[in-house]
Amino acid sequence: MILTKLVQPTCGPGQLGMLSNTNWLKALAATGRKTAEEALVWLHDHCNDPSLDDPIPQEYALFLCPTGPLLEKLQEFWRESKRQCAKNRAHEVFPHVTLCDFFTCEDQKVECLYEALKRAGDRLLGSFPAAVPLALHSSISYLGFFVSGSPADVIREFAMTFATEASLLADCSVKPCTKQLHLTLAHKFYPHHQRALEQLARAIPLGHSCQWTAALYSRDMRFVHYQTLRALFQYKPQNVDELTLSPGDYIFVDPTQQDEASEGWVIGISQRTGCRGFLPENYTDRARESDTWVKHRMYTFSLATDLNSRKDSEASSRCNGEFLPQTARSLSSLQALQATVARKSVLVVRHGERVDQIFGKSWLQQCSTPDGKYYRPDLNFPCSLPRRRRGIKDFENDPPLSSCGIFQSRIAGDALLDSGIRISSVFASPALRCVQTAKLILEELKLEKKIKIRVEPGIFEWTRWEAGKTTPTLMSLEELKEANFNIDTDYRPAFPLSALMPAESYQEYVDRCTASVVQIVNTCPQDTGVILIVSHGSTLDSCTRPLLGLPPRECGDFAQLVRKIPSLGMCFCEENKEEGKWELVNPPVKTLTHGANAAFNWRNWISGN
């Protein structure tokens, strides 16, 4: 009546060679004990892993997973809920019903876990429900399907049987799920998204027959509370303390251990190699928590001898991300471009690379003479600095763009020109690097003489992140005009420069940005073009969420997010007058990605060779 088969490993003891048996068992466990070839590749990649000999077992968990048409509809809900209501905790894992909490198992006893799964499945095979009834349940922070009645009792009995067998065969302490069984659809979402999520959930058809698969997964217990990044591009280390990246690599990052990392960099551990090092953060993207989990074995419950059931389950495990078809992307870009002609839009842009980002806090000492004159010690220092009444020392906490930052700003402006959008007004933070970026973008747009830059102190950086106990000495409007910046001296800012407080609280910063962006939008009531805001990485969040009607992020989440925003990063908000709200849409230009270029001393190179 049912065909159920557990895939067995194909490795044999004759293939171990001179390898340590402990390391070999670790490699098998880390790769799901599928083939000897995969385990050998893992060992080769981890030859420099400092933790290779550490006796750290994997953590395992058992999930009941849907397959076939129901899985497809659930994945469609995952995509649409993320698009309409932003990411929530449910997006971190594939659709599933948890059958037991994560538990540890020694590497040499993993085969016994597979036998425990088979025994539990065989024992409950005849009583497993032909259909698993799902009832929608919703609360202010949770949305999901509950499983109840006699089918739930059978599933709980299966989980308890597996726990008993795992204890007997593999000496594992397994805690089966004995409470309400549930398949989570959304968790820890914003309360105002509850209705939209419920509507999407009710559209999931539950009448389809479904094969359910009990799947055994493992994860590395050391990185449970880490963030997971996925490499988008290849990166070759420029220094010995940097990580090699290949597209698709997963990197574990501890947010609490980033003090040593410079801006734009993070310290992480590669899942592929086990090595630790620095990596450029803009070469990566956030990955799902479950993307690094390893599937070991499956037991499929079915009322028919369906050979394709295993293929369906395997397809569900390969779902690592979604990509819009090229036609859909093209249509989306066209619609965004058309919308800028008829609707008010706000484009928030982070400034270009700042000189202290490359040369550190002592950058000013590197480029100034004892008598206070500027010179250029490296080509990435700007050719000159604007004149300041109090001298060169005022640049220390108000640094200019580097030469690369100037290039970044120009190339972004040129791309905006090619996109065809119409900039109607420009607002900039009073920080020199932001005013410079705005000026360079306007020059590439051929608008530097037509549009004046309105300096708005209300969108300045969170002052707690600024050095010192006082706010930085910023250039006055008169100094900016003398330095050839086309400044609108008639503009009355929402937040005067004198009102900036040092070391302000996060809430004070959020309130300041909210008041400023509201005035900026209201300052241009008749404009139907694009309002350009050039500011800091933090404002891509703090100046867009008020428009979108979203509450502020948690302070810790906000700090981590800002670290990932690269130079010339952009967010694009568009007013939807028909629905009376603002929406995030694709920016009019692509991102700018490039690698590092280390300093070179030819004398050391010659003497070293």
Image (spheres, rainbow, N blue to C red):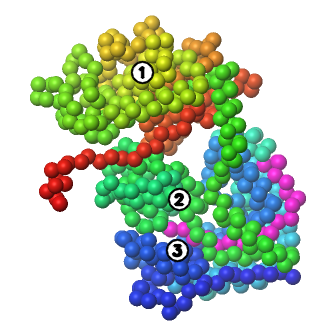
Of mark 2 and mark 3, the one earlier in the sequence is 3
**Disc sitting over residue 15 in the figure:** none
Q: What residue type is labelled 3?
A: Ala
Q: Identify residue for label 2.
A: 248
Instruction: Answer left or right for 363 relative to 573.
Output: left
Q: Which of 361 and 244 is in front in this view?
A: 244
Label 3 Cα neighbours within 10 Å, binned few <14 / some 14-19 / many ≥20: many
| Stretch of the chain drawn in magenta | 201-220
Three-letter code for the amino acid on which mark 1 is drawn? Lys
Give the CA distance from mark 3 to mark 1. Answer: 53 Å
**Separation of residues labelled 2 and 3 (CA atoms):** 17 Å
Decide whether residue 280 is among the magenta residues: no
Q: Is residue 238 visible in the rendered structure shown here?
A: yes
Residue type pointed to by label 2: Gly
The residue sitting at 63% across, 54% down in the picture is 321
Along the line of sight, the residue nearer the viewer: 363 or 301: 363
Quickly name the residue at label 3. Answer: 30
Asked whether the beta carbons under mark 2 and mark 1 sit within 8 Å of each other, the answer is: no
For label 1, the residue is 439
Residue 463: x %, y % from top left: 38, 30
Which comes sooner in the sequence, label 2 or label 1? 2
Q: Earlier in the sequence, mark 3 or mark 1?
A: 3
Residue drawn at x 58%, y 76% is 32
Q: Which residue lies furthest to the bottom in this view?
A: 14
At label 1, counting other C-alpha atoms closer than 10 Å, the crowd grade (few under 14, some 14-19, many 20 or more) is: many
